[in-house]
Every structure is written in C-alpha cells, then in structure tokens.
Image (cartoon, rainbow, N blue to C red):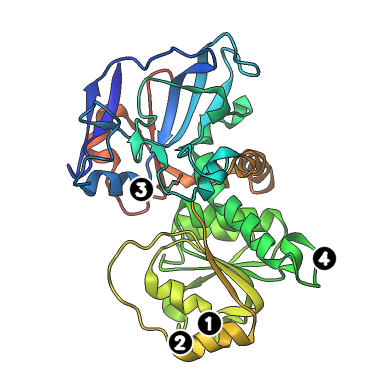
Amino acid sequence: MRAVVTRPGAGRAWVAEIPEPTFANTDDVVVEMLRVGVCGTDRHVMARARGDGSGLPPDTDYLVLGHEAVGRVINVGTHVQHLKAGDIVVPTVRRGCGECPACAVGQADLCFTGRIRERGIVGLHGFLAERIVDKEENLIRIPDELAPVAPLVESLCTPEKALRRIGNARAHLPAKAGPLYGVQRALVIGAGPIALLAVMALRLRDIPTWALARSPTDSPAVRLIQQAGATYVPLQEVDLEQPQAQLGGFDAIIEATGAAELCVAMFGALGPNGVLDLVGGAAERNEVPIQASVLGAMVGRNLTVLGSVNANKDDWQTAVRDLSEMRRAFPGTVEAILTHTFDMDDVDVAFERVPGQIKAVINIAGA
Ligand code: BGC
C-alpha cells in the first residue's frame, strides 16, 4: 500500500510502497484512512535527526508520518466490542511506556518515564497510509458528519487538556461560579490551528476571550477569531514589558506559539490567581531575560504557570463534542481552518508553509 514516509533528519517526506499493517490480535481494528492533517510536529520529525535511530519503529528504516487523522473501519478482530465496519474513527497518538503508574491507567499523556511512543512522531508508524491497524482502545468513534474536519480533533485535544488543567489549577479558589472556576477573562497567544481552536473552546464556554498574534488584522485567522466572538489585538501594538497596562489582567492564558519571549512576557499578563498554560513547546536554545520582579509578582499574586502536552481519552471525547458544538455555534469557522487540501502525490509541497495557510490536510484514497 502507499504511505507518506520520512527518515528523521532527512528534511523531507516522500511516497513509498510499504507492506500492509499486520492484523493479528483479536482486539485489532483495520482502518482505511480518509484524511490526515499536517502539523508543525511533522516538520520537526523530518528535520530532527536522532543519532541512535530511536525515532524509527523496530526493523524499519523509515517512519510513516501523520498523527492528526480520520478513517473508516473496514475490519474488526473477534474481541472488538464497540466498533464495526463503516464506523468513522480518529486514532489517538501516544502509546504508554508500560512501566509507570500513569501509563498503567491509560494516562500516557502524563507518562513519568518519557519512554512513550507516538504514532507518526516517535517509534511507531503514523497514519499517512492507505490503511492502519490499531487496538480498539486507541480509536475514538465520531459522528459521520464530522469526518471532513476530523483531523482537527487531535489539534483540539491539546487546548482541551489545557482547559482541564487550568480548571484543576483554579479548583481551590473561592470564585467557583462559571466555567473553569470563575475565569472572567481569558487570553490566547497565537493564530495557528491550536490557538484558534483554543479561542473557540473558550468562547463555547461563554468566556470573554482576547487573542494576541502577529497576523495582519485582515488575515483569515483573525476573521475566525472575531467570528467566534473574541477580541483580536496585534502583538505589535502591545507593550510586552507591561501588557496589563493596555489589556488588563487575565485569569487564564493559553500560550500556543512556543516563542520563549512571549511565554515569559505573558507571566506579566496574569491577573490575581491567574493560570498560564504553555502548549507551544519552545525548541530553540536561545535565552530570554526574566526580571526578578516578575517572579516576585508570581508569589505576590498566587500565579500558576504550567505546561501541557498530548491529552487523555476524556480530552479526546471532549474535543469530539466541542468540535460538533463549534460547527453549530460559529458556522463555517471550523471548516475554514482547513485552508489547503492535498493528495498523497502532492507530498513535495504539502508540508511547506505558505502564506495564508492555517491547516493543510492530505486526502488519502477513499476520501
Ligand atoms: C501532538 C501530540 C504529541 C506532541 C509531542 C503534538 O504535535 O499533537 O499528540 O504528544 O506533539 O510529540
């Protein structure tokens, strides 16, 4: 069958003819892939050489890319309980280490050892293939009508986890009324798919939301922010030394750019008891200065800064529910996040960043 593959460090992806996946266990499910989203992580996987070859699945010299996917079940093992041929499913990404207490209870997103594998990212083939096999427990059934936009379920589970963790971090506060324990004002940094979905998830909960990014005010992403009822402020107009002077303080901030200087600047945008969740994953080695008084303010205002990666099964279910709700609440916006559509044969251009692009998807045979 055909698949889009890479080798970590190769800096590119290509279409290859690879063996069919093995359908061997009684809880296995065979899924015909419909479409797969392209994500910044894919570019990192292609670009980053792992000296020990540990990024590759055992006994192969390539990695099938793709982790934001949707497909249709075409065959199920004898012990599969809830899925049947024809069901539309999204596969989860991370597989546990098999050693730690978090992975033992299906919370590989909280793995203690770091020896996780992630399909299409590290150690396991991804979903940019005509067919995949996975265990029933790793597949989430979704409503059929969500299939065209369903690669976004994976993108959305990141902000869903962030919101859950922000709620947990605020659960001790006396202001318990309303969503996320009394969040009155929220801020999202960025205008990529995760940031846009974070904005929409906050607006679904009726939380007054602001978004800060470098995008021009007439860009498609900014229009989506505004259509979801949030306020957009161009980053260039904000004094990052004292963001609250202009924007006021925020009870919750989701930082989705990974730009270290923005992460640090956002400490200063938190109101009393505020929570900042970093989901962008800064990878550069540059240093950013931080004033001691910023740390003092963290103490003086009971601030929480946390980081979150990946998501648990509940977050995936919430993402499926919210994506459906978003399509009803903000018509046309979810579809508009998918700005570019490619076929497998477009592999040379599908991973390029082009102006105006929010999310690209690759259609696979059968879509
Ligand atoms: C994916 C997550 C994954 C993370 C780290 C992200 O792009 O959405 O599922 O855990 O990368 O590899």
Are the residues tagged 1 and 2 within 8 Å (C-beta)?
Answer: yes
Q: Can you name the residue that lies furthest to the bottom here? A: 293
Mark 4, residue position: 177
What is the distance, in whole Å, between disc 1 and disc 3 at their CAs? Answer: 28 Å
Residue at x 44% of width, y 49% of height: 113
Mark 2, residue position: 241
Mark 1, residue position: 268
What is the distance, in whole Å, between disc 3 and disc 4 at their CAs? Answer: 37 Å
Q: Quadrant of residue 143?
A: top right
Please state, as top left, top right, bottom left or bottom right, where the C terminus lies in the image: top left
Q: Is residue 342 above or below residue 325?
A: above
Mark 3, residue position: 41
Residue at x 23% of width, y 31% of height: 62
Q: Earlier in the sequence, mark 2 or mark 4?
A: 4
Are the residues tagged 3 and 2 within 8 Å (C-beta)?
Answer: no
- The type of residue carrying mark 4 is Ala
Q: Earlier in the sequence, mark 1 or mark 3?
A: 3
Of circles 3 and 2, the one toward us is 3
Q: Is residue 106 above or below residue 26?
A: below
Residue 85 picture location, percent across and down: 56, 12
Q: Earlier in the sequence, mark 3 or mark 2?
A: 3
Residue at x 64% of width, y 38% of height: 317
- The type of residue carrying mark 2 is Glu
